Amino acid sequence: MTPDTLLRWHRQLAGWRWTYPYRRGRPPAGVAVVSLIEQMARENPGWGYKRVQGELLGLGYRVGASTVRRILKRLRIPPAPQRTRSAWRQFLRTQAATMLACDFFHVDCAVTLRRVYVFFVIEVSTRHVHVLGMTAHPDGAWTVQQARNLLMDLGERAAEFRFLVRDRAGQFTEVFDAVLAGAGIEVVKIPAAQPAGERLCRTLGAHRQGRGHQPDADRQAAAPADGPG
């Protein structure tokens, strides 16, 4: 008798003594769980796999994060960051006619060596730009006044707009938001600069470079800086 024969007999004996049902991984998620995962992902674009898993656990469903990922992939639902971007683009498309966006750009004067900040508001649907004021020191009080100037500039048309998109710069205070809220315009804060604002700043910069950076034009642009509106 060889050692291999003895080991083979031992393996057979162990197989006869301990038999377990054949399992092929985790059982598939039920229809109710799949439907719940889809509902959570579509109604909450910012939720990732772990968040969905945690919410399911709170409801009594033990589902792994990899299972959530596999189900969402099968349903062609993108990961959370991509869903958030899609939701933001959809918001912009549906609300463009009632949306404003504001930002600052700066102009450097070659004669006075001063930097002037220009505050503007753009109507998202028409790309119409309201240049409301310029100053060398755009603090909170000055920016609040520009919000009032915007409402005066819009006049009765202010009722047509529901949202104003801005970043989280320190010049925008709670009073700035309150002035617009009094006119029925809700302020939407985002961490990044507005794409429309960046595009306008690039266009203006290219225009200034194209005309040779004329000192007289810079001097005229810097003149109102001494007395902001």
Image: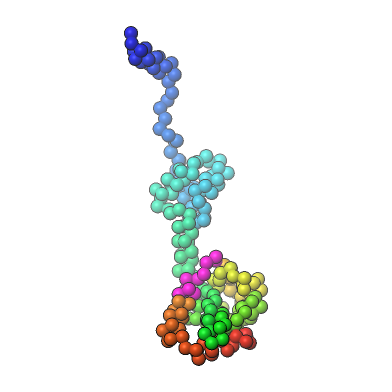
192 or 218: nearer the eye?
218
Can you say which quadrant of the picture contains the C terminus? bottom right
Membership of 195 in magenta stretch = yes
Q: Is residue 112 left or right of residue 94?
A: right
Q: Is residue 165 magenta?
A: no
At x 57%, y 67%, the residue is 189
Q: Which residues are magenta?
A: 190-200
Q: Looking at the rendering, which quadrant does residue 179 occupy?
A: bottom right
Quadrant in the picture for residue 151: bottom right
User: How many numbered markers are drawn?
Assistant: 0
Residue 190 vertical position relative to residue 56 in the rendered view, above or below: below
Q: Position of residue 220 (x, y in %)?
A: 54, 90
Q: Residue at x 60, y 85 (%)?
A: 225
Q: Is residue 123 above or below residue 61?
A: below
Residue 220 visible to an observer of this rendering? yes
Q: Is residue 152 visible?
A: no
